[in-house]
Image: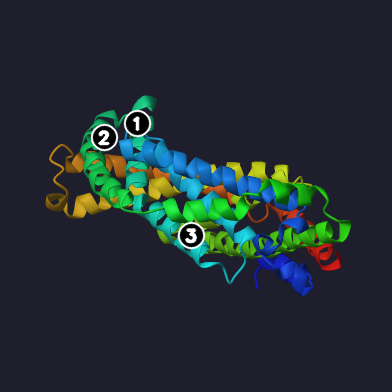
């Protein structure tokens, strides 16, 4: 096993009593804790944010809304995985399926927006290839319009109302339950806290393993699908770290700041990979793409420019992973959290 993944062997999640393996959502109202209440608040806020974004995306006026909805989907999926352990209730399974459907439905539209941003940034930088980037933007703008027409019609057919209302009902405490919560005894509160710690340790163990493995693969085979997998693994680890930071777990902010920076680097690299694939496809099958405004000379010029930019992004990523000081610090942080909070869950 690679050095990057040894951490998940050396710092296993401690075996915990059956009580700590319950879903927090399954605990009765009298067994609340500050940590559980915080998770509940985060979940409700993300769900409300997601619902608020639906009409904004459907109106197709704010070009940042698509990416924001996809990010909110992933954040919500992460918090739901913490709150509802398997086997999950039927309405949560349905909600998670529909969140994934929304995210995947918006994937092509998000790629169009990302490629337009690459073109706009290149034009703003005024490189030698400005004419070629102008032609590329002229091709992408109608493509984005066509993609939006199909995508938003599919999104409009996804029914999120009932799963949303069912989840809200899970988390809404009646006045009587809130009074009961205020009288919670210490043992019950400790049990609920243990559930949260156990869930965090279990998720962190899984997310770090996926991330460390993806980093290793990227160093050996930095192709597009490997970069895409690494990008997803970094997002999942980052969104989990966001929750841990809100629970005031020591070291979370430093890990989160590094993950944000790394995710930005990976995102640029990934978008350049998509751009290069599109350019090569256009070059090989020009009639299929209807790109009269893009000449062969334009495309070859853009591929060269894109390739150089991509090399810089890849080099930056390689410098900040595996043996870098920041990477090793985050690795030690994960080990410390798995040791301390996994043990805390087991001993509550």
Residue holding disc 3: 96
Q: Disc 3 and disc 2: Cα gap in Å?
A: 35 Å
Residue 132 at x, y percent in the picture: 25, 34
Q: Nearer the viewer, residue 203 or 253?
A: 203
Residue sitting farthest toward the front: 176
**Residue 54 visible in rendering:** yes
Task: Check contact, mark 3 vs mark 2: CB within 8 A.
Answer: no
Could you tell me which secondary element the residue under label 2 belongs to? Answer: helix
Which residue is at a point 40% across and 46% down the rendered structure image? 271
Locate the N terminus and report the quarter of the image it occupies.
Answer: bottom right
Q: Badge 3: how crowded within 10 Å, few (<14), some, or many (20+)?
A: some
Q: Nearer the viewer, residue 165 or 23?
A: 165
Looking at the rendering, which quadrant does residue 285 occupy? bottom left
Give the label, 3 or 2, closer to the camera: 3
Residue holding disc 1: 120
Task: Check contact, mark 2 vs mark 1: CB within 8 A.
Answer: yes
Q: Tell which circle, 1 or 3, labels the residue nearer the N-terminal end.
A: 3
Q: Nearer the viewer, residue 36 or 172?
A: 172
Residue 214 position (above or below residue 118): below
**Residue 319 visible in rendering:** no
Residue 281 position (above or below residue 202): above
Residue 343 at x, y percent in the picture: 83, 65
Q: Disc 2 and disc 1: Cα gap in Å?
A: 7 Å
Could you tell me which secondary element the residue under label 1 belongs to? Answer: helix
Say the numbered circle drawn on residue 137: 2
Residue 301 position (above or below residue 21): above
Give the label, 1 or 3, closer to the camera: 3
Q: Tell which circle, 3 or 2, labels the residue nearer the N-terminal end.
A: 3
Q: Disc 1 and disc 3: Cα gap in Å?
A: 35 Å
Q: Nearer the viewer, residue 216 or 212?
A: 212
Q: Tell which circle, 2 or 1, labels the residue nearer the N-terminal end.
A: 1
Could you tell me which secondary element the residue under label 3 belongs to? Answer: helix
């Amino acid at each position: 096993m690679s050095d990057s993944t040894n951490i998940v062997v050396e710092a296993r999640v401690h075996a915990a009593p059956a009580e700590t393996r319950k879903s927090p959502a399954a605990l009765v109202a009298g067994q609340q804790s500050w940590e559980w209440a915080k998770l509940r608040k985060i979940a409700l806020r993300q769900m409300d944010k997601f619902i608020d974004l639906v009409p904004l995306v459907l109106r197709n006026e704010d070009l940042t809304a698509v990416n924001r909805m996809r990010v909110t989907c992933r954040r919500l999926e992460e918090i739901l995985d913490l709150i509802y352990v398997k086997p999950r209730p039927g309405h949560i399974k349905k909600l998670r399926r529909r969140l994934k459907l929304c995210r995947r439905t918006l994937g092509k539209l998000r790629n169009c927006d990302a490629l337009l941003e690459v073109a706009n940034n290149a034009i703003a930088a005024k490189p030698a290839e400005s004419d070629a980037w102008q032609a590329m933007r002229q091709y992408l703008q109608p493509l984005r319009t066509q993609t939006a027409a199909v995508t938003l019609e599919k999104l409009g057919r996804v029914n999120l109302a009932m799963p949303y209302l069912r989840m809200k009902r899970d988390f809404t405490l009646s006045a009587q339950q809130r009074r009961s919560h205020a009288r919670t005894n210490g043992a019950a509160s400790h049990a609920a806290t243990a559930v949260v710690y156990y869930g965090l340790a279990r998720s962190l163990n899984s997310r770090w393993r996926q991330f460390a493995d993806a980093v290793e693969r990227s160093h050996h085979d930095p192709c597009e699908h490997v970069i895409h997998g690494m990008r997803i693994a970094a997002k999942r680890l980052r969104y989990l770290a966001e929750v841990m930071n809100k629970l005031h777990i020591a070291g979370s902010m430093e890990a989160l700041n590094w993950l944000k920076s790394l995710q930005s680097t990976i995102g640029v690299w990934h978008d350049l990979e998509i751009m290069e694939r599109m350019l090569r496809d256009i070059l090989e099958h020009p009639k299929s793409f209807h790109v009269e405004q893009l000449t062969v000379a334009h495309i070859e010029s853009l591929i060269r420019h894109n390739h150089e930019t991509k090399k810089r992004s890849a080099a930056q990523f390689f410098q900040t992973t595996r043996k870098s000081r920041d990477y090793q610090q985050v690795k030690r942080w994960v080990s410390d959290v798995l040791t301390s909070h996994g043990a805390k869950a087991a001993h509550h």
